Amino acid sequence: MGIMSEFKEFAVKGNVMDLAVGVVIGAAFNKIVSSLVDDLIMPLVGLLMGGRDFSGLFVALDGGTYATIEAAKEAGVGTINYGHVIQNVVDFLIVAFTLFVVVKGMNKMRREKPAA
């Protein structure tokens, strides 16, 4: 069996197609979660914490004070953007919890009912 025929057999198996569909849906789901976090959750968390905008939280590496991350970058100063890290952690937690719920539901459906 040649390498091309082996690859063709591998590529047309259902698992590969399922994986491809999962990757595409996962990418779309990631955009939805990012929007949810960036546009709804983090503004509410910021409001509850005194009106802070987490996306703009940073530390300038030269020790100076800059109004925005963009102003620091225009001045050629490196920044540690810990506000973005906080948002990405919230993104991850939402995705991880959602996947946990989905996998738990799938496992529950797969379990066989005990024989009567």
Image: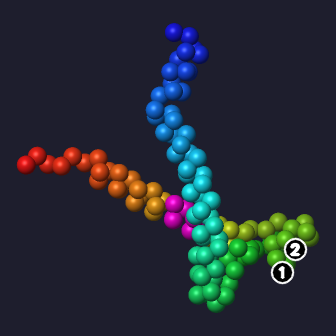
Residue located 86% across and 68% down the image: 73
**Frontmost residue, 103 versus 9:** 9
Q: Look at the numbered disc 2 and give the secondary structure of its residue.
A: helix
Majority secondary structure of magenta residues: helix
**Front-most of 65 and 67?**
67
Residue sitting nearer the eye, 62 or 1: 1
Observer able to see residue 87: no
Name the residue tied to disc 2. Answer: 71
Identity of the residue drawn at 54% across and 27% down: 11
Residue 20, compared with residue 111, is above or below; it is above
Dot 1 falls on a residue whose secondary structure is loop
Instruction: Judge left or right: residue 52 versus residue 65.
Output: left
Which residue is depicted at the point 58% across and 64% down?
A: 33
Report if residue 102 lies within the magenta region.
no
Q: Is residue 90 magenta?
A: yes
Residue 67's label in the rendered image is 1
How packed mark 1 is, by other alpha carbons closer than 10 Å (few <14, some 14-19, many 20 or more), is few
Q: Hey, which residue is sitting farthest top in the picture?
A: 1
Tag 1–tag 2 contact (CB < 8 Å) = yes
Can you say whether 45 is above or below 72 in the image? Answer: below
Q: Is residue 65 left or right of residue 116?
A: right
Please indicate whether residue 95 sits to the left or right of residue 35 in the image.
left
Q: Amino acid at mark 1?
A: Ala
Badge 2, how many Cα within 10 Å: few under 14, some, many 20+? Answer: few
In magenta, the rendered stretch is 88-95
Q: How many marks?
A: 2
23 to 99, vertically: above or below: above
Percent coordinates x, y for residue 20 in the rendering: 55, 40
| Mark 1 and mark 2: Cα distance apart in space | 6 Å
Whether residue 21 can be seen here: yes
